[in-house]
Amino acid sequence: MSTDKNQSNGTLTEEEIAELQDSVDMGDWGDAAPPRKAKAFWPSAMRLLRLFVHEQLALTVVFVMVVIAVVLSVWAPSILGDAMNVIFTGFMSSDMPATLSREEVIEGLAAAGQTQLVDMLSGMQFVPGAGIDFSELGRLILIVLGMYLMSQFFMWLQGRILNDVVMRMIFRMREDIERKVNRLPLSYFDRNSRGDILSRTTNDVDNVQNAMQQAFTSVIYSVLTIIGIIIMMFSLSWQLALIALIALPLSGIVIGIIGTKSQRMFTDQWRHTGRLNGHIEESFTGHDLITAFGRQDEMGKKFRERNEELYDASFKAQFYSGMIMPIMQWVNYLGYVGIAVVGGLRVANGQMTLGAVTAFIQYSREFNQPLGQVAGMANMLISGVASAERIFELFDAEEQVPDLREQKQLGTLDPAGPQPAELAQPVQGKIEFDHVAFSYSPDKPLITDLSLTAEPGQVVAIVGPTGAGKTTLVNLIMRFYDIQSGQIRLDGVDTALLERGELRSRIGMVLQDAVLFGGTIMDNIRYGRLDATDDEVIAAAKATYVDRFVHTLPDGYETVIEDGGENISAGERQLITIARAFIAQPALLILDEATSSVDTRTEVLVQEAMAALRSDRTSFVIAHRLSTIREADIILVMENGAIVEQGNHQSLLRQEGAYYRLYMSQFNQGSDPDEVPTVDMPKLPEPGDTEF
């Protein structure tokens, strides 16, 4: 963000925003700021599930497969209990006389006073002397193994399908985030640190993906398994089922109390992650400056503070979520002990078979397992929903007002109101400010009543102290911000009636900081006009003196720009940005002190390149070194958002006003204002020179 804006409108720093988050109502910041406390879990979870609306068929198939897998896995213990009955009854009957019937054996034991054994055998179907039926036992075991095998196959298949579904949903989410970011006004990025925005668009999305891939099916499978097991347990013994189900209300209390607390902790964790990321990015991008000023200790101290905040938040989140599983397991063990004791008594009394109790114990263990899985997945789900909340806050952030043409396409344009307009061709480049008023904050006016006219082909220089509003002025031309009142006209057409894309396609910008993108030098120049041919790119490079140094590079125009353009000099980077603006052939040009960061020799080339770029174009030049704008057609002197003087160099000096004071502050007080300060400038390289 420009220095002008920071000084003039009181935009808050990242640290100030962080402090306000803990002390004031975040309503003034809209939905963009991280919440102080987590929103309700279920509304956010349901909104997350609605993102799967395009995957209804696939999700239906997944659900059916999960149901089949659950039915098979739940049914199998019952059959395994039948196998246990085959073993036990066969073992018990093997020592009985084969000449007696079942009833005779029971009567004989009753007569002998074996009451407990009689009660147990009364609930069993056996044939005295038959022994274990291994053929029936083998058949039941094969059935059980087949059921478990098919159950796992369906679980694998649904997992494969669900993985594709989740990846498609995340793909659409990332696209929605990209479109949303492009629709956000610059004021959103002014209020939120880049680290926090990056955290929402990367870390939080990854966290949602992990939660949906790993926890979604597990929760569905576990819930259906719990329902199926409950049905089977009640079919075997409602008394034992009630003992087993005592774990449910206790588990609900645990998740309700601890889970809610854990959700808030995870939200704090991701908020502190965003702040730490922002600090790290700032440290990396400003490493040279930090080293030059010896501020490593201060930056390290701030890093440790934020790292400590993240550690505390993460520790608390993991501590609370980690309590869920042990408590749930303890509750489950209580139920397991109760089932074993009561079940043993019922077998001894002949009220249940050993196979039924064995199956019930298996069900109780399988019942505890999905409960444990639900508890284990609660950690991931809570974290995922907390991340989803932050993404939804980004989605809900107020967007910039749509262009009139876009409103017309959407059917929301008032027929009686202003209508979209188009520029006549070719664009001449006449700019008019008509009583323009603008402020970044309603309670801090910046530009109150600004009027000026720049004729086609004129060079308009904008000077003034820091915070005067110089960069704000050109930002308004680009419609980076919308004015509160007045009009800005391009060739007589109100820019508010134009599409932003159409307006900006007519304007070229060369900023003080040369921004290059990953790719080759030719790609970076072509960025100004993507349909430009190689010959046009080279012609633009020659016109702006890029061609002079490109031939000294091993790969020429195919040289790949490293991160931030570190493999070429600052002057070379600036020349590339000028070539990028040149190839766009704009009608209007904005130059923001493009020579301030280059050496004297390179400045000659940059000035010549900018002169070629300004030819026959209306140009706005933001200048700090007044010696570079002496030949401007109009010089605007700004103070506190207003134009206090305008004219050419000589006329402004004769007025001995604000411009005179700025000019004299840069040169000796005793010099003649009409005398041009002389600077020994090196000779411009000839076309055949290669040294640069």
Image: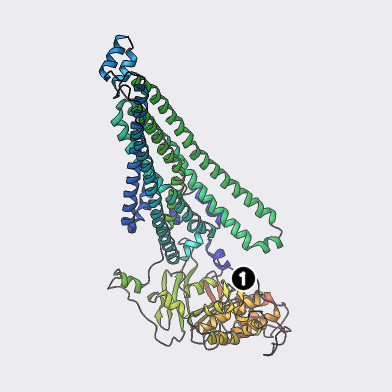
As drawn, the residue found furthest toward the top would be 112
The residue drawn where x is 56% and y is 70% is 468
Residue 339 at x, y percent in the picture: 38, 26
Quadrant assignment for the C terminus: bottom right
Against 645, residue 147 (above or below) is: above
User: As drawn, is 670 to the left or to the right of 124?
Assistant: right
* Front residue of 415 and 67: 67
The residue positioned 67% from the left and 53% from the top of the image is: 298
From the viewer's perspective, is residue 519 above or below residue 179?
A: below
Residue 316 in picture, x, y percent from top left = 53, 41
Residue extending furthest toward the front: 99
Q: Which residue is mark 1?
A: 562
- Vertical comparison of 140 with 490: above or below: above
Whether residue 630 is visible:
no
In percent of width and height, residue 15 lies at: 57, 54
Q: What residue is shown at x 54% (from left), y 45% (from top)?
A: 314
